[in-house]
Image: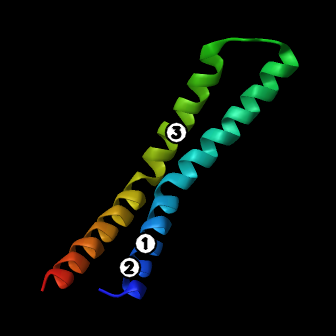
Amino acid sequence: MTIGELTAILERTMFATLALGGPIVIAAMVVGLAVSIFQAATQINEATLTFVPKLVVVAALLAALGPGMLANLVAFTRYIFMTAAQVSR
């Protein structure tokens, strides 16, 4: 296996990681920022106020994007196993 092939695998791995985790992390950050601004404006310091909205948004995103994310993960896993099978020959 050459350096170019390893670089391609690493690049595809990073892209898959960003594609699978990126939307959820970004949505949680946006909701967290909105809740923090709301808490600063109203001076309400309730711990559940930060947790529950994030939980709801992440659950909704997983329900909406889950099948596509799973298909992406399955395709990536197949690619890795096929590449490993070619290297072992």
Q: Earlier in the sequence, mark 1 or mark 3?
A: 1
The quarter of the displayed image where residue 84 is located: bottom left
Determine which of the numbered discs, if any, sits on residue 58 in the image.
3
**Picture residue at 64% right of the left edge, 23% below the top:** 50
Q: Looking at the picture, how far across and down is residue 44, in whole percent? A: 77, 11
Q: Residue 40 placed where, x, y %?
A: 83, 20
- Where the N terminus falls, by quadrant? bottom left
**Which of 54/9 is in front?**
9
Q: Which residue is mark 1?
A: 10
Mark 2 element type: helix
- Indicate which disc residue 6 carries: 2
Q: Nearer the viewer, mark 2 or mark 3?
A: 2
Image position, residue 51 (x, y; %): 58, 23
Q: Is residue 76 left or right of residue 40?
A: left
Q: What residue appears at the point 45 percent right and 45 percent down from the top-left corner?
A: 62
The amino acid type, in three-letter code, at marker 1 is Leu
Nearer-the-camera pick, 66 or 18? 18
Residue at image coords 43%, 80%: 8
Q: Are marks 2 and 1 in contact (CB under 8 Å)?
A: yes
**Rounded to the nearest whole Å, what is the CA distance between mark 2 and mark 1?**
6 Å
Distance (Cα) linking label 1 and label 3: 27 Å
Can you tell which of label 1 and label 3 is closer to the viewer?
A: 1
User: Which one is nearer the viewer's eye here, 15 or 62?
Assistant: 15
* Amino acid type, residue under disc 2 in the picture: Leu
